[in-house]
Image (spheres, coloured by chain):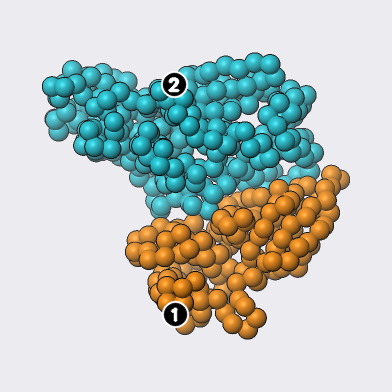
Amino acid sequence: MKPPPFEYHAPPSLEEALTLLREHGDEAKALAGGQSLVPLLNFRLARPRHLIDLNRIPSLDYIREDDGALAVGAMTRQRAVERSPLVRERCPLLAEAMPLVGHFQIRNRGTVGGSLAHADPAAELPAVVTALRGALVARRPGGQRVIPAERFFVAYLTTALEPDELLVEARFPAPPPRSGSAFLEVSRRHGDFALVGVAAVVTLDEGGVLTHAALALTGVGPTPVLAEEAARVLVGDRPTPQAFEAAARKVSEGLRPDADLHASAEYRRHVAGVLARRALARAVEQVGGGAR
Amino acid sequence: MSERAIRLKVNGREYQRTVEVRKTLADFLREDLELTGTHLGCEHGVCGACTIVMDGEAVRSCLLFAVQADGADLLTVEGLAEGEALHPIQEAFWEHHGLQCGFCTPGFLMTLYCFLRDRPRPSEAEIREALAGNLCRCTGYQNIVLAAKAAAEKLAATGR
């Protein structure tokens, strides 16, 4: 199908975009890479009166280190993140998840901010920023707030952003020394939305005992799901197969996924446990290797 | 009806047109420029038939508005061959029966154009991953993969 009519704005600066967003509020949609919004328009599932195209705002396209975190501008293309040596070095979890987002043609246009603000529960980036306890920076005319990832994803395709707020930056904190991470997922074909995905982050002390663990899952709830109980049983333990197995059981037990055409709830729970176990093992392998 | 004047380059030629802002780049190429080699299958970014090259990168032209291509440099399937001489990727598809009905072919060709430029000596697994975003409803994937391999060799041999 073809998109419904709309008024098109292509502001050359963030300030002008924010002014337009305030002016049109609920009747406006911000257009980032368009890889989720344009299909919704083509199907007429979304009918915004105003489209505010952010693609002419170069100041939102950057990857840089900032105060111990990797800061990524909202309009940074996913492909640029995938190719960035700085991302590989400072945020291996993001680097590992990036090639799993859609296909390379999608990542050539798709943006980091677009994927996060769209908040699809099967998407990879929301789980990455959640597992790392990252944050999202929102701007409105004359104001800015930093929203922790756990509070940003509110419900299915719904974020904490107000109608006059724009997501401008994602912040991925650098894990402490002796940390490792892994992102694993199961999808029917490469590039499809994952049935289940798991982002794992671990930190060990000098004696090889787990001092921190985080598991964030995709595809098993309306938002990224933090498996807090599983993480809790790991801390203070050594990273053994038995410990991972116990944590994986906690992951499966704690989930209430929906069933759909592609997978039953039971299957999703099972896959989540298996992926959690493998992701933890892989994350521990990365300690001292890929991680800093 | 909201319209904008745009100026862009397609296959080396400059165009200036006025477009309705809701017109997708794919429809603009086909209807306004009459470059009907770019095909539209699903119109929501899944099938890959509409893949073109924009400023050097493969993109879905059904997920862009023509107005967004203002100032851009595009390459479509019509720009691959040089006169009567097919591009090495096209030759490889011909020689290895990499197409049956041909509907998906332009998208596969443009995808490979960028992929083989970035990764001139790919493994078969890498080829399959790169082609995962293009659907062939004749399911001619085996020969498409063979054609992609042959295309990589041809490009390496010709230094393109």
Q: Residue at x 66, y 40 (%)?
A: A55
Q: Chain of mark 1?
A: B
Quarter location, residue B107: bottom right
Q: Chain of mark 2?
A: A
Say which chain is orange: B
Q: Is residue B99 visible?
A: no
Q: Residue at x 18, y 31 (%)?
A: A245
Residues flagged by tags 2 and 1 on a common chain: no
Q: Which mark is residue B96?
A: 1
Q: Is residue B3 left or right of residue B75?
A: right
* Residue type (three-letter) at the residue carrying disc 2: Asp
In the rendered image, residue A282, in percent from the top left (x then y), is placed at 24, 38
Q: Mark 2 sits on what residue? A: A67
Vertically, is A255 above or below B17?
above
* Residue type (three-letter) at the residue carrying disc 1: His
In the rendered image, residue B152, in percent from the top left (x then y), is placed at 42, 71
Which colour is chain A painted?
cyan
In the rendered image, residue A195, in percent from the top left (x then y), is placed at 40, 42
Q: Which mark is residue A266?
A: none
Q: Nearer the viewer, residue A156 or B25?
A: B25
Measured in 3D between alpha carbons, the distance from the residue under mark 2 to the one under mark 1, in whole angstroms, is 54 Å
